[in-house]
Amino acid sequence: MRLGIDIGGTKTAAVALDAEGSARHAVELPTELGPEAVVATVAEAAGRLAERAGTPIHGFEAIGIGVPGTVDPATGDVTHAVNLGVESLPLARLAEAALGVPVRVENDVNAAALGAAHVMRAGGGAPVASMAYLNLGTGLAAGLVIDGRVHRGATGLAGEIGHLPMVSDGELCPCGQRGCLELLASGSALARLWPGDGSAPPARALFDAADAGDPVALAVRSDFAASVAAAVRLLVLTADPELVVIGGGISALGDRLLAAVRGALLADGERSPFLAAARLPDRLRIVPRDVPVAAIGAALVGDPTAAAREEAPWPRS
Amino acid sequence: MRLGIDIGGTKTAAVALDAEGSARHAVELPTELGPEAVVATVAEAAGRLAERAGTPIHGFEAIGIGVPGTVDPATGDVTHAVNLGVESLPLARLAEAALGVPVRVENDVNAAALGAAHVMRAGGGAPVASMAYLNLGTGLAAGLVIDGRVHRGATGLAGEIGHLPMVSDGELCPCGQRGCLELLASGSALARLWPGDGSAPPARALFDAADAGDPVALAVRSDFAASVAAAVRLLVLTADPELVVIGGGISALGDRLLAAVRGALLADGERSPFLAAARLPDRLRIVPRDVPVAAIGAALVGDPTAAAREEAPWPRS
């Protein structure tokens, strides 16, 4: 069995994968912020999951952690995890000290990309080998899976498409540029464009109002869908993945989001035979609701192949 | 010895690489347009190069062809090679029939990317393993080298960044979209923006006029450099290559082009600490003048490693 832990800005999810790669047990608890508290949250999640799985922590074949920020894949050190109140943290080392076993650390969007490739499955039931995972959370970023492995790039910047400017003279982004994609297609963008009355998340409030015929909501939703479609086009015309899978908080909208973005992609294709030939609507998927893809991917980090799993089989208790 | 042939819209270049990967012999001849004429040009180039190298054509260890258009890597069939007057052509099969030896075919920008990775060399003299090749020719497209191999993507669209819209409500592109990057940063863009008197290529005429202080030329050059810088940013924030190497006809400007684009990247970095941390100016290179990177890459197609070369050593005559 493998253990994966996804540390988010508000909650931490942990999942156990069996030898066949199926999620067997899961726990979720609030994330405590700050360096020591983050490590304590990891230890708490691992302990609860081990208890639920009926195994000691050293009984897990592999333990991986997904975390926001910049991760050094060699050392497992984390920097710039602003949402966790962490500027710099030797997470792998501290988690290993707390758990008493080796731990691998990966950026959370990259982990989610690996988890989504595992969950979506291609023909024959194999994980999707060529995929872009488009995370629509508070911000916007993508994770690339190439030949079945996470593509981090030379400096860990691969997939940082949220900070590509899309609008000349657009709004000022905290990154210092103007008109960044993240300002148009993310949870924070929707919270700004459609604050609502707070009774529902902005994305759901917007889609509800649009479905009810509110003309402003229809326009805001249309612009939002066009910006997500631009992200899909961007991913295909650079890395050319077989699938683009949308995840993150906004993906809880499910088929309603899929329909809006597919509609925008179809409209783009009607204007451009070149885009139509790229079959963007056919490549679009959304992660199944309530599947913790980042925790699942964290469990697979560094060792996504069945062959590798067979080399280190789950020890029978 | 390996033979590489690059079929361009106006000329066809052929080069022989020795066992160490150094270019030993080269020929260049005008490309004859149309399916039969293209194959005849390939045969003529191969024949002349074999004569110059003092070897029969079957004495070459491997023969590769770079060609514009969409290439099926499995069959070597070419489609949409509009500049060659070719709609569809089983190029590998016809070239093999003409030459009597196996031939591999690759898209010309991908071949050039492989050739540039070979020519630029990283520390230790090895080919650059992680690189984006930005081709500024009549159009604009990129080739990605990941882990030392060409990344074609799932459908051969990887690197087609010329058709990413950069300006909302920009000019209509032949692809059907508006404001595509290719309309801002390519040879055809400069020919439109700075037609000149025809005594020099538009790119050179523009840079000469800007250096002479012409205020309109200075503005056009500044916009052009900013658009090339946007292409560099785009490549780094998606694939995150170690180097971005500019090639294609406009790269004949050499250090003058490099200085203009570096200047634009530095200005971007002054506005954005995020971009400054990505060290874009440090990643920028330009292919050495008069080095036929596409022909060199064609010679390496499908077999870029020294290890692979050792398995099929050059037969001594």
Image: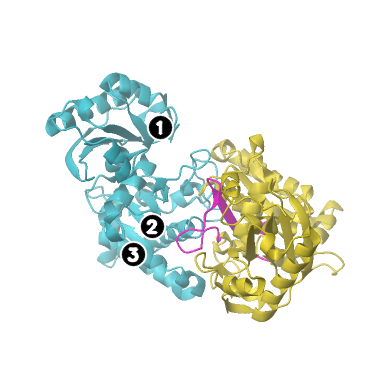
Chain colours: A cyan, B yellow
For marks 3 and 2, the one nearer the N-term is: 2
User: Mark on residue A260?
Assistant: 3
Could you tell me which residue is drawn at 28 percent across and 32 percent down?
A: A63
Q: Of A233 and A172, which appears nearest the observer?
A: A233
Give the mark nearer the N terminus: 3 vs 1: 1
Q: From this viewpoint, is residue B245 visible?
A: no
Q: Residues within 10 Å of mark 2 (few under 14, many from 20)?
A: many
Of tags 3 and 2, the one toward the viewer is: 2
Please name the amino acid that badge 1 sits on: Ala
**Residue found at x 59% / y 37%:** B276
Choose between A38 and B218: the one closer to the eye.
A38
Asked if residue B117 lies left or right of residue B156, the reply is right
Q: Is residue A298 left or right of residue B142?
A: left
Numbered disc 1: secondary structure? strand
Q: The disc labelled 2 sits on which kind of residue?
A: Val
- Image quadrant containing the C terminus of chain A: top left
Mark 3 residue element: helix
Helix or strand or loop: what does disc 2 sit on? Answer: strand
Q: CA distance from mark 3 to mark 1?
A: 32 Å
Q: Amino acid at mark 3?
A: Ala
Contact? badges 3 and 1 (CB < 8 Å): no
Identify the residue under disc 2.
A244
Image-quadrant location for residue B128: top right
Subunit of mark 1?
A: A
Q: Which residues are magenta?
A: B135-160
Quarter of the image with the N terminus of chain A is top left
Which residue is labeled 1 in the image?
Answer: A81
